Image (cartoon, rainbow, N blue to C red):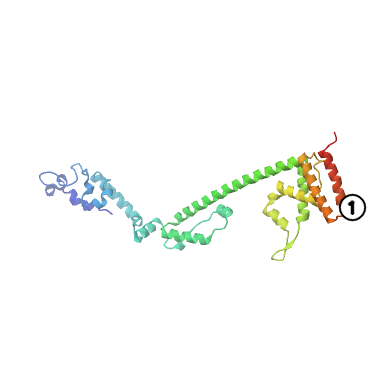
Amino acid sequence: MFNLFGLLPFLMADGDGGGESGGSEGGDTGFVGSDGTFKEGWANRDEFKDNAEYLGRYKTVIDLANGLVATKKKYNKNPDVMVEIPSETSGDDVRAAWGKAHGAPENVDGYEYSYSDEFATKLGPLNDERLAGIKELAKSKHWSSKDLQDVVDFYNTAMLADLDSGNAQMDEMNNQSHDEGMAILKNLWLDGTDVRTKDALEHLQKYGEIEVKGKDGNMINPLEKLLEEAPQLKQSPWLTLIMDNMAAKMGEANRHGGGDTGALSLDGVNSQIDAINDRQTAIRDESPVNFKNNAEFKRNDEKLNQLYQKKFPPK
């Protein structure tokens, strides 16, 4: 701390400041004018050059005195906070003193961090190992617990913003994909879309529901687990198309799109014809001699006749 009283001998060197023991007869030899104003460049004298930048702020003796008194008052209130601010070249003792004045704990265990419920819900459990590493860093930098809280919160907030942004983009992509699939369904099935979608889901449940034994010995339904993980699959137009096609190839499709519940588009007719023809070929391969007596083959033949009538209606 710079001592004002160390300046007194120099201040008294001025003629007005020191009486008979003051300056010489030829003029001022000090650096303070008769009005108490410091002379230009006074802080650059050899006696003060180490503190020239600080002292140069003061233009009068009164300013300097008031500044010293204000500093002394603050110092007397809490001497621990009157420490040197570390620079890049400061030693460990200066940094440690700064950390103590700044509220840094004495050891790593003194650091505390409060993980918010929002972070826990969206980012998952707190990584204790990673937090321990951050505390070590905080101690080496002489941070306070508040510094650590602010830094980690800043990082988690940024992570949360990235996560929310990514989720928003994913939702937008999923919505676009869903809309594209629904457009295809409606083009194929027109007014029969809702019924066909329901039938496809029932087909999935009929043939997809199996049970397997879990590690604990209890039985698990994989289809239920799948729909729990991805409930949106129940409304997926792509899964609907897949299951409808599977039902057609298995000969169990309950087609509602071309008669009772609505007109079928030409693309829809062609799609059904192709699916049934594929199934007919499979039946022929399975029973080359008696395929015509196969009940499914006969039903499919009737469906094909109906579809061809729709594709080529009589004029």
**Callout 1: SS:** helix
Q: Residue at x 81, y 51 (%)?
A: 281
Question: What is the x, y in percent for residue 33?
Answer: 18, 43
Q: Of all residues shown, which one is farthest toward the left?
A: 25
Q: Residue at x 84, y 44 (%)?
A: 304
Q: Nearer the viewer, residue 57 or 243?
A: 243
Residue 222 to residue 31: above or below = below
Q: Residue at x 43, y 60 (%)?
A: 139
* CA neighbours of label 1 inside 10 A, class few (<14), some (14 to 19), many (20+): few
State the quadrant of the N terminus.
Answer: bottom left
Q: Which of 219 and 24 is in front in this view?
A: 219
Q: Nearer the viewer, residue 73 or 278?
A: 278
Residue 139 can be seen in this image: yes
Question: What is the x, y in percent for residue 28?
Answer: 14, 44
User: Which residue lies under the disc numbered 1?
Assistant: 293
The amino acid at mark 1 is: Asn
